[in-house]
Amino acid sequence: MAVESKYMPLDGANAVSQAMRQIDPDVVAAYPITPQTAVVQNFSQYVADGIVHTEFVPVESEHAAMSACIGSEVSGARTMTATAANGLALMWEELYIASGMHLPIVLTVVNRALSGPLNIHCDHSDSMGARDSGWMQLYAETGQEAYDNTIQAVRIAEHSDVLTPIMSCQDGFITGHGVERVGLLPDEAVRDFVGSYEPELTLLDTDRPATFGAWDFTDYYFEHKREQSEALIKHALRVIREVGREYEELSGRPQPILDMFGMDDAELAIIVLSSTGGTARAVARELREKGDKVGVIRPRVYRPFPDDMLVDAIKDCKAVAVLDRAISFGSPQGGGPVFTDLTAALYNHGVVGLPVVDYVYGLGGRDTLPPMIESVYDDLAEVAAEGDRGAMVRYLGLRE
Amino acid sequence: MAKKQAPRLDLPWQEVSPGGVVRDEGNSVTYITGTWRTVRPVRDTEQCTQCLICWIVCPDSAITVEDGKVAAFDYDHCKGCGICAQACPVNIKNPHAVTGEMGKVIQMIPESDGDA
């Protein structure tokens, strides 16, 4: 049964702090970094005002933040943190420890370019680098979705079939600092939705003592890694779908794994994460009115990669463009991670001959404007008409 | 302490404890690390003064003590680090009962020379 949301003008970072206030986690250990700062700043104010029951740990670095989160989560406390860019990079070794120990930590990421040269604006180079760290990753188009994803992330990560940490990402500045109309669920509705965290074993349970993070030798490490992978390849997407349906019933807001526009009969499709999905949809809507069979797929989930669904959605298209807000340096022709994963998925599902072009866009906060998206559809029309893919990796908004 | 059962080393991945959590507390005693050893400590029991310094410094609790005296090396867990031989303060007056060399009460010999 849907409950009424209360609408407020909020930037995306503040929307996430509101979600954190309503989740009221046991522990938050975090360190400020642009453009995530507002998330932690607002939340620490809630702690200081006694609005939440959270133990807030003001650590000296992101390395310490994730370390504190691991200690806290393994002790049985529901734990959250937030970061961006170089802060995420500083968490690196702990990311793998958190996922390897099956600790369902929720990390909200406000995506920012990973320097250098120094840049604080949006791209996905920070979280994309962590795509193999064993964490799940959700990408939000809007501040509203960042709020919704953060609340669902708690349930997804803590599900007994998953027990895997999760990143809830949104675009720095574009949605992180952009004020929009955000619907907040009632506090008690969120509290009931997330429920309480009841791990089976914890470090502080002296009645059932256990050892966590012990030495794992050549005789068992391999088996533990295979077991860790199972949560992502077998269970996570199902759980994300189930939690999404439940959240949709509560909020009235749909939570698809792939947010699709025009894909029922699209011949030319763009696949893009996060805020640029909105720009692409606006352009596609205009082109549709002119009769062009164009579509947009905006995956809300990138890890685990929803390969079956994506292949199924595009297999009948005539040409597809992936928009990547990061370069996977040294990959074939310097394409981006989404393109690499998608084309591998097509091959492995036996879909060959579908021309797919990669566009690297928006690095370091470069604006991606509607005419650029239109040019992608123009390019795709040409690829489809001529039956020749042409350059595999292209650039959108780059001076050349 | 009750005798612990050794952990199985043949579990398939489907049956391992997620995250490597060890649910059976205190089971490290069942994990045999003595196979890592390339050199082993040997003690001249006649010339030993029972100062117990080797027992204090052993990082693997691999020196067993009975009735306040050093009884034996636990070769199931001794990794052959040699700290006991290094810390042994007693300069022996007669050649070592095992090695025949002068020096300390505890000396290290190559593992292949021992009767492991």
Image (cartoon, helix red, strand yellow):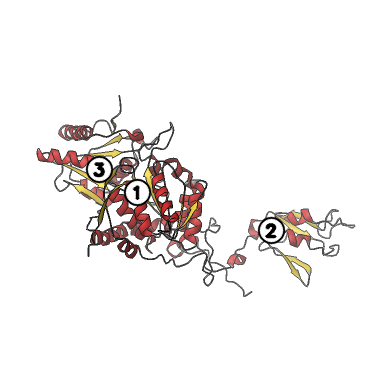
Q: At 20% from the left edge and 46% from the top edge, which residue is drawn?
A: A315
Helix, strand or loop at disc 2? loop
- Badge number at residue A277: 3
Residue appearing at x 33%, y 44% in the figure: A176
Q: Chain of mark 1?
A: A
Which residue lies most toward the right here?
Answer: B93
Q: Which residue is labeled 1 in the image?
A: A14
Label 3: element kind: helix
Q: Amino acid at mark 2?
A: Pro
Within-10-Å neighbours for mark 2: few <14, some 14–19, many 20+: some
**Labels 3 and 1 within one chain:** yes
In percent of width and height, residue A188 lies at: 32, 64
Picture coordinates of residue A223 (x, y %)? 46, 58
Q: Quadrant of residue B53?
A: bottom right
For disc 2, the chain is B
Residue mark closest to the camera, 3 vs 1: 1
Q: In the figure, is residue A313 to the left or right of A395? A: left
Residue B59 numbered tag: 2
Can you tell which quarter of the image residue A240 is in? bottom left
Q: CA distance from mark 2 to mark 3?
A: 59 Å
